[in-house]
Amino acid sequence: MKIKIITLLILSALLTGCWDNVDLIDINIVTALGIDKSEDGKIIVTVQVIEPAALQSTSSSQGKGGMAQPKPVFVKSYKGETISDALISMKAVVDKRLFLSTLQVIILGEKLCREGINEALDFLHRDYQVEYLADVLVARGCSPEDILKIQPEMDAIPAMYIKGTIENTKLRAKVKRTMLIELFKDVKNKCRQITIGQITKENEKTVKAEGTAVFKDGKLVGWLNQYETRGFLFATDKVESTVVTIPVASGKMSIQVLNSNGKIDVKFKNGQPYRLSIYVNLEGNIAEYTGKGVLSFQQDIHMLQKALSEEVKKEIAMAIRKAQKEYSSDIFGFGKIVHKYHPQYWKQIMDQWNDIFSQLPVDIVVNLKIRRSGLIKSPMIKDE
């Protein structure tokens, strides 16, 4: 599998047109890019570069003893006045041209994000090499270099391992996935503030992609944890699948959500917004039950549906509370509703919308329907 991946990366490096054609031996294939700011205000750029020969050697020698194998990637950082300056100046420590069309992930540093990401986005948008489908993440509690220097056991290429943790969010809904092309669109949208997925370093071999970085006017203002993130994704119709767990009598129950539909609205009265509304409809199956007693698919299921709906409602409420009261940032996109249905009002207040958003009460309605309870109705307990 690793050889297939590297083959695809090499082919993408070769098939870039003939006007700027270069030999493969004259380029460094970059799989990940990190951008941060130093304490003195300069830009720090980090690249993760693949070593095709070392990767092939590592793959073919898995499970064999003997000599230590060369690393399949190397990571280099350089400080410059701007991103482009740092990348060009990096040729002082790398021997070949950096090829960015093979980018898989882009890691933004916390300091950079707190001061504003417009400079980084300007470079990424202008450079014709940059891969628009690369996943973008914000490093929390560590630098992009720390993230890119991990040596995962699950994948020879750290960038591919990181990308995999983001792609599986559709199964768990606890991190906000943001591709670069989506970020370009969102940052220009005055009706909604941007959000980017959060990544942290667990140890030298593992990262955790969980949570969301919240921005306001292009600057990082705070974070949503994994449950607040799921509430945010429920409300904005971004959940494909997840597992929600609630306490039951002497145990717990987990519901696998298989279908989710979220909708937001802004209520107006006398030409002014007076209330925000969030509607979420869910369908799911019982995935696990560790309580006591046998489930009745009438009375008990009805009570479980209500309890699960309240749990999802609580997660949404936590997310909206942080967005309103702590960050004053409309990450949900209520401004889009106002802009679409009340354009004249929007023109008057667009610059003050985040403050208005923060003061409006919110109604949250969640309806959940349990379809199946599984092959058994009672928990797996020993006979007494």
Image (cartoon, rainbow, N blue to C red):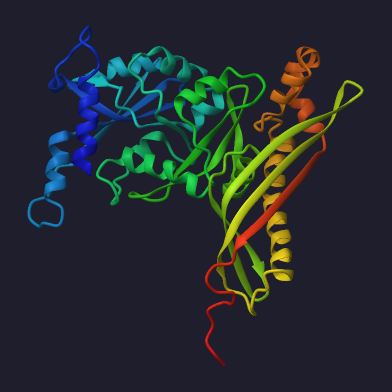
Instruction: Identify the residue at the far bottom of this view.
Output: 384
User: In front here: 97 or 92?
Assistant: 97
- Left or right side of 342 for 128: left
Q: Residue most toward the left?
A: 66
Q: Is residue 365 left or right of residue 64?
A: right
Q: Is residue 268 left or right of residue 200?
A: right
Q: Quadrant of residue 90?
A: top left
Is residue 106 or residue 314 the one in the foreground?
314
Residue 45 x %, y % = 36, 25
The front one of 325 and 311 is 311
Quadrant holding the N terminus: top left
Q: Picture coordinates of residue 212 (x, y %)?
A: 55, 39
* The C terminus lies in quadrant: bottom right
Looking at the image, which residue is at 40% across and 23% down? Answer: 132
Let me know if residue 253 appears in the view. Answer: yes
Q: Residue at x 71, y 69 (%)?
A: 298
Q: Is residue 317 above or below residue 329?
A: below
Q: Residue furthest right?
A: 270
Picture quadrant where residue 216 is located: top right
In the depicted structure, whether residue 164 falls above or below residue 126: below
What residue is at 55 percent from the left and 74 percent from the top? 376
**Can residue 50 be spotted in the picture?**
no
- Numbered disc total: 0
Q: Position of residue 166 (x, y in %)?
A: 43, 41
Residue appearing at x 73%, y 64% in the figure = 302
Q: Position of residue 346 (x, y in %)?
A: 76, 16
